[in-house]
Image: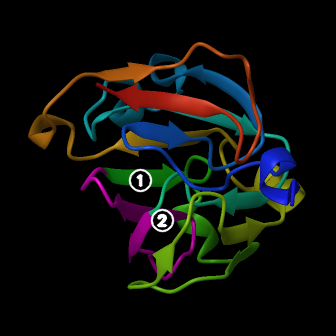
Amino acid sequence: MFKNLFQKSTQSHPGHIYTPVNGEIIPITEVPDPVFSEKMMGDGIAIIPSDGRFTAPADGEIVQIPETKHAYGIRTTDNVEILVHIGLETVGLKGQGFKTHVEVGDTVKMGDLVITCDLEYIKEHAEHIITPVVITNTNDLKGNITPKTTKNAKIKDTVIMTIT
C-alpha cells in the first residue's frame, strides 16, 4: 500500500538533466580541452567520475555510441540532445576498458545503465577521466540552460542542468 510513497522515482522530469555518473561536478569551462571548455560542442557541465557506471541522464533514445564506446548520445523525450564523453583522449583506447549495455535505437529511462568502464584502466591510459556532459543542440532549444553548482553527483538523484 505504501510502496510508492517511500520509493524514489526513476522517471526524469521535463527540462531536467540528471548526472549520468557518480562523482564530483565541475564547470564545463574547467575541462582541460578547449573543444569542451570553450563550449564548441554546446553548453554543459563536467563530472570527475568516482566509479565506472554511466547511465542515461534523462528518458529518451540512444542515438549514438561510437565503435570506441568512449561516449554516447541520447535524444530526450523533450528533443534535447546530450553527449556524455567519458574521459579525454579516450577515443585512442579503441574500446578497451569499455562495455556497452544498450544499442543505438534503444529507449532508455533516466538512470538506466548505458556503459560501464574500467576507471583505473582509463586513468592509466587516457589523458583524463573527466567526463563532459554537453547539450549538443543548445542553439535549437527554446529556453536557457542552467548548470547546477552542486558539488557531488549521485546517479538518479542529482540534477546537473535545467532547461527553462
Residue at (46% x, 32% y) in the render: 33
Q: Is residue 83 above or below residue 107?
A: above
Q: Is 43 on the left-hand or right-hand side of 143?
A: right
Q: Which residues are magenta?
A: 60-80
Residue wearing tag 2: 72
Q: Is residue 72 magenta?
A: yes
Q: Are marks 2 and 1 in contact (CB under 8 Å)?
A: yes
Q: Give the label on residue 159, or none.
A: none
Q: Residue furthest top?
A: 149
Q: Position of residue 146 (x, y in %)?
A: 38, 19
Location of the C terminus by quadrant is top left
Residue at (84% x, 42% y) in the render: 50
Q: How many marks?
A: 2
Location of the N terminus by quadrant is bottom right
Q: Is 153 on the left-hand or right-hand side of 71?
A: right
Residue wearing tag 1: 83
Q: Position of residue 51 (x, y in %)?
A: 85, 50
Q: Amino acid at mark 2?
A: Tyr
